[in-house]
Image (cartoon, grey):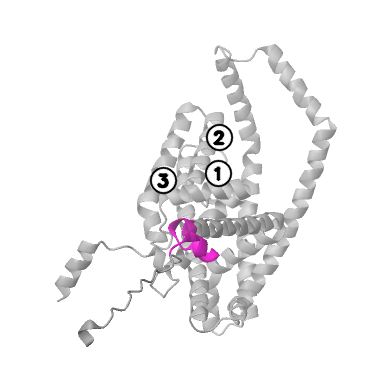
Amino acid sequence: MALFAPRQPRVIRFQEPSVGLKADRAPWSLWADGFGRLAIRSIQAIIVVAIAAGVIFVIQSLTLVTIPLVLALIFASAFAPVMRWMRGRGVPPLLATLIMLLTTVALLGALGWLIVWAVRDQWDELAAQAQEGFQKAAVWAQDLPFFPSSDQLDEWIAQATDFLTSSQFGSGAIAGVGAVANFITGFVLLVTILFFFLKDGPQMWEFLLRPFRGENYARGRRVGEKTVSVLGSYVRGTAAVALVDALGIYIGLVILQVPLAIPLAVLVFVLAFIPIVGATIAGILAALVALVANDWVNALFVVGVVVVVNQLEGNFLQPVLMGRTMKLHAFVVLVALTVGAALGGVLGAVLAVPITAVAWGVVQVWDGPGTPARWARAKVPARAQTAEGIATR
């Protein structure tokens, strides 16, 4: 009977084509593909750039506060080993801070007095030599085809006289007085902030780290220690290199009998804090003084002395004194100088390199005392990893 049972009709069920259709996908799934991830990264980059631009704008608007704050941090980092040594000998923090500040002020005052004394002592001689040199240069330049005529010179002198007697020059002088007032205010603020950084710097950083716990707190400690270490190493190493440069060029200028040797040596010391550009500017100024006061042969000898001293400093002295703390590529240094000069002028160029070094130093200890951030770690090729794994077996 079962053999002749009627066959049941076959039911065919069709699956509704709802899966995979764009119309039924959730709106946020559009951000899951490659183009969506690229858009998310672009938005994040725009937000980061906007925040950075806002921070830079605030810094530029409050330079009277931000510049003394950064300079005080750099000086406090440079003096940190001396402060630790005095505290380790039982010197009270207040007394150690006063000793450090008074010693610094005494050294700067002695240096300023030395410069003023040298300029005042040699000014008459230099003025006479400069007048004679300019006269010789004018006589020699009159034979050149592009040398201006006497009428043009008279016109330029008249224009300069009109500018000096105009109201525009007076407004510029008033602006100069305002700049001097801002400088004095900033200097007083710098000394005050430096006093508190030297006296209570570690306690102030611990206060800022109170909201953090665990690994974030440890990372904050590493960031603070690395910042102080890098800034201190930069200032002390650069100062030592600048001092050797200044002494070498001073000896060369004295041997060549170039006037204002002491002020030029001090200028070499100051400009040495601007990498790459500072040494070039100092050499040009020293050569110009030798050209005006002596002759062109003496100026060439001065250029030779500057080049030899800079080569010795760059190839032998700087690697020993600076070590690997400030190991930045020349391209990075050049870009940092350009950005710093564009944003902050000469002072921005001075601060650009140490700030860049601090940023890179923080990246190097982000995930541990000797562990850089994950994105900044050196990538090992697959073949090298395989060979290393076989060698360790």
Q: Earlier in the sequence, mark 2 or mark 1?
A: 1
- Residue 130 is at least partly visible in this image: yes
C-alpha distance separating marks 2 and 1 = 9 Å
Q: Do residues under tags 1 and 3 come within 8 Å of each other at their CB atoms?
A: no
Secondary structure mainly formed by the magenta segment = helix
Q: Secondary structure beneath disc 3?
A: helix
**Rendered view: 137 above or below 282:** above
Which quadrant does the C terminus fall into?
A: bottom left
Q: Do residues under tags 2 and 1 come within 8 Å of each other at their CB atoms?
A: yes
Residue type at numbered disc 1: Leu
Q: Secondary structure beneath disc 1?
A: helix
Residue 25 tag number: none
Give the residues in magenta: 20-38
C-alpha distance separating marks 2 and 3 = 18 Å
Quarter residue 61 falls in: bottom right
- Magenta stretch encompasses residue 324: no
State the image coordinates of residue 162 (x, y, percent, origin top left).
80, 25
- Magenta stretch encompasses residue 26: yes
| Circle 3 residue | 309
Q: Residues within 10 Å of mark 1 (few under 14, many from 20)?
A: many
C-alpha distance separating marks 1 and 3 = 14 Å
Residue type at numbered disc 3: Val
Residue 289 tag number: 2
| Circle 1 residue | 264
163 or 33: which is nearer to us?
33
393 or 305: which is nearer to us?
393
| The residue positioned farthest toward the right in the image shown | 167
